[in-house]
Image (cartoon, grey):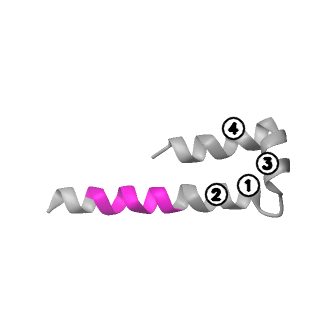
Amino acid sequence: MRERARDKGRLIDIVEHADKAQLIIKGRSFEEFVKDISVYYSVMKCIEMY
């Protein structure tokens, strides 16, 4: 049962990081995203977290 609680926590973290990544790229085109290295790496870090 404890494993399910940890899994739920991990899933919540994944959703939160995905939400953060979406906020970072909101309103940007793909070209703008790729050209702005700080935005690019910020989003990649959100994805790497989990």
Kindly report which numbered mark, 3 or 2, lies closer to the viewer in this rendering: 3
Neighbour tally class for label 3: few under 14, some 14-19, many 20 plus, Cα within 10 Å: some
Picture quadrant where residue 36 is located: top right
Neighbour tally class for label 1: few under 14, some 14-19, many 20 plus, Cα within 10 Å: some
Q: Earlier in the sequence, mark 3 or mark 2?
A: 2
Q: Hey, what amino acid is under mark 1?
A: Ile
Q: Is residue 44 above or below residue 29?
A: above
Callout 1 secondary element: helix
Q: Earlier in the sequence, mark 1 or mark 4?
A: 1
Q: Which residues are magenta?
A: 6-15
- Image point 65% across, 55% down: which residue? 21
Q: Hey, what amino acid is under mark 4?
A: Tyr
Q: Among all residues in the image, which is located at the extreme front?
A: 31
| CA–CA distance in space, label 3 to label 2 | 15 Å
- Label ID, residue 24: 1
| CA–CA distance in space, label 2 to label 1 | 6 Å
Tell me the residue that label 2 is attached to: 20
Q: Hey, what amino acid is under mark 3?
A: Phe
As for residue 5 lying within the magenta part, the answer is: no
| CA–CA distance in space, label 3 to label 1 | 9 Å
- Image point 67% across, 60% down: which residue? 22
Q: Is residue 6 above or below residue 43?
A: below
Tell me the residue that label 3 is attached to: 33
Q: Earlier in the sequence, mark 4 or mark 2?
A: 2
**Residue contact at pointers 1 and 4, CB within 8 angstroms:** no
Q: Position of residue 43 (x, y in %)?
A: 66, 46
Callout 2 secondary element: helix
**Residue contact at pointers 2 and 1, CB within 8 angstroms:** yes
